[in-house]
Image: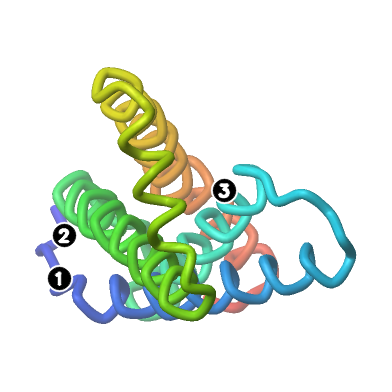
Amino acid sequence: MEENVTISKYVIWFTVVNLSLTICISIALILLEIDSSTSATIAALVGAAMVAGSKFIQDHKRVPNRSEKTKLVWLSYLTTWLVSLLLLGGFVLATNEGSQLLEVMTSVSMGIIVGVFVFFSIVILGTLSLSYGFLARKQLEGMKRKGAI
């Protein structure tokens, strides 16, 4: 069985790519005057996980084992929320719309807010688990076929 490796490098890759893709996709959607949706966020999430997974595979010639995958999923999940909060804070500061956001938040019941948080958390965790599991195995197969590893 493989020895667990330190995954902090791959979480950093995930975070940088996630932040970059989220900003780029958001700017593109604004310029194209397309309403933003969660599918754009999921695309950034999958893209970032694929880059981090690819880096892991290139470095170790294998997919993350169960323990490494669990750490990658949870740490990527936490950084996803941190990136979202960072971008939300930047938006609020840049547009001075904090009072409107607070007004909307206070008009919605806490149950709905918690429900939305739980729903999106499940979607994020499922997407990350799929990316670091099934999709990582597909990446490994593709790299082996191409002779990249």
Residue 16 drawn above or below residue 7: below
Residue 2's tag is: 2
Q: By what rule are the colours in the image chosen?
A: rainbow
Q: Closest to the observer: 56 or 113?
A: 113
**The quadrant where residue 76 appears:** bottom left
Residue 31 drawn above or below residue 103: below
Write down the residue under mark 1. 5
Amino acid beneath label 1: Val
Image x and y of residue 81, in percent: 32, 56
**The quadrant where residue 63 appears:** bottom left
Write down the residue under mark 3. 42
**Dot 2: element:** loop
Residue 25 drawn above or below residue 101: below
CA gap between label 2 and label 1 equals 9 Å
In front: label 2 or label 3 = 3
In front: label 2 or label 1 = 1
Q: What residue appears at the point 24 percent right and 51 percent down from the top-left corner? A: 65
- Are the residues at dot 2 and dot 1 in contact (C-beta closer than 8 Å)? yes
Q: Is residue 148 left or right of residue 19?
A: right
User: Which numbered disc, 1 or 3, marks the residue that appears first in the sequence?
Assistant: 1
**Dot 3: element:** helix
Amino acid beneath label 2: Glu
Q: Is residue 35 left or right of residue 15?
A: right
- Are the residues at dot 1 and dot 3 in contact (C-beta closer than 8 Å)? no
